[in-house]
Amino acid sequence: MIQRQFYDPGRGAMTCSIEGLEKFDSPGKGRGLRVTRAFQTGELLFSCPAYSYVLSLKERGCYCEFCFTRKEGLARCGKCKKAFYCNANCQRGDWPMHKLECSAMTAFQENWCPSEMARLVARIIAKKKMQTERCASEKILPIGDMQSHVDDVDNERKDMYEGDIAGLHRFYSKHLELPDHKDLLTLFSQIACNGFTIEDDELSHTGTAIYPDVALINHSCLPSVIVTYNGTSAEVRAVQNMKPGDEVLISYIDLLYPTDDRNNRLRESYYFTCDCQECKSKSKDEAKLKVRKRIDPIEPEVISNMTRYARKTIRELRAFKNIKNILLISLNNTELLEMCEQSLEEMGAVFDDSNVYMLHMMYQAMGVCIHMQDANGAIRYGEKILKPYSQLYPPYSLNVSSMYLKLARLYMGIDRHSMGIRAFKKALAIMEVAHGKDHYYLTELRKEMAEK
Ligand SMILES: [Zn+2]
Ligand SMILES: [Zn+2]
Ligand SMILES: [Zn+2]
């Protein structure tokens, strides 16, 4: 599933008009969104309810399936015993969507395994049907306008969609009339380009959703806004001071990587190349690809070979995790940590510790340590990651705030309170801008800090 999305130029309308914003034809990008008044850093541009959304299976029991409230003591669906809600109201509200899965989960038991994308597609089809029944004349199908790039999809991804479509037929056809194969393929490619992954305060994946108005926003590697999530809604806040006429720009991808890598990613997933100021100047590329200082300089050929090795290792690691995910095999942590450590050792002969490929592997290793409850191991990696992260990411970055948060919680867990509070404060400073001062994550954070 892809992080960010974009929209088809020239068609469709915003689902509602938003004060201070307007659609326009962005040169070279098709349709875009711009501000018609000034916005200060941290100010909310708009909030957008999800057109359709789905909670990740691994988060069941932690979040309400309907309103995405995170709390303990949620009540279970009495039929399937797999979905959890705040109360009867939330359960009732979710029923039109949950009924697509409730009895099927009971019937298939552990064989019930549609992908998250297939689950979202089923909900979109059900929602479309409900809306057409309610008012046949009205066209409230924002998803219908979204660009699909169905002809550009590579074979690997096409195979994935075929698997997802088979899953839809197997698990949903009893309660849902499915469109024909060609329309389903289009729908899957639309979601791949336009779907948003909902992430929590530590950037852990909690669900997938469609936000039609946010999907109007074009990409830049120097974004003017950040998208965060509040319940099932998306909120868009300025991370720069904006003046009337400025285009609203988000980043569709992880901005850690150098220009070539970013654009490869954009072409692979979104079928375009970025021409923002950073892509032209490549001002951060040298720092991102920093080479170890040695008395005898390292040959350029050695560096380019190591870069190739790093990219290959990252790809392999991703494929390895994906395969395990698809086969529902839990990752072998020791095996994974070994992969990370081995590549860190190899790359470390050429790359500086602040090189993004080193950071990538350290981040993976840190995740494994957290999973294995090795706080000291995780802290060792986290401390190495933090400083280069703060330098290489833009000033207000969720990647940086979530890293501070992880570290803060790790410090607190081993009673290093003053370090913990310091890291919490750093996370707060970023989140006050990105999430807004009143977001419940911040209320929770302040409570966490006061308790210690
Ligand atoms: Zn709820
Ligand atoms: Zn149920
Ligand atoms: Zn760019």
Image (spheres, rainbow, N blue to C red):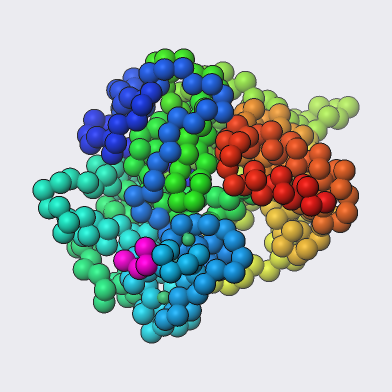
Residue 242 screen position, x and y as percent:
49, 18
- Total residue callouts: 0
Q: Residue at x 37, y 73 (%)?
A: 101
Q: Is residue 400 above or below residue 157?
A: above
Q: Say if the magenta span includes residue 113.
A: no
Residue 32 screen position, x and y as percent:
35, 27
Q: Which sits in the foreground, 86 or 108?
A: 86
Where residue 352 sits, quadrant-wise, is top right
The reply to whether residue 47 is visible in this rendering is yes
The reply to whether residue 323 is visible in this rendering is no
Q: Residue at x 40, y 31 (%)?
A: 218
Q: Is residue 422 above or below residue 174?
A: above
24 left or right, relative to 106? left
Where residue 270 sits, quadrant-wise, is top left
Residue 386 screen position, x and y as percent:
75, 39
Q: Is residue 253 above or below residue 56?
A: above
Q: Residue at x 61, y 65 (%)?
A: 72
Q: Going by the picture, which residue comes out furthest to the left?
A: 137
Q: Which sits in the foreground, 374 or 266?
A: 374
Residue 326 screen position, x and y as percent:
50, 67
Q: Which sits in the foreground, 358 or 18?
A: 18
303 left or right, relative to 240? right
305 left or right, relative to 298? left
Q: Residue at x 39, y 38 (%)?
A: 214
- Chief secondary structure of the magenta portion: helix
Segment tinted magenta in the rendering: 92-96
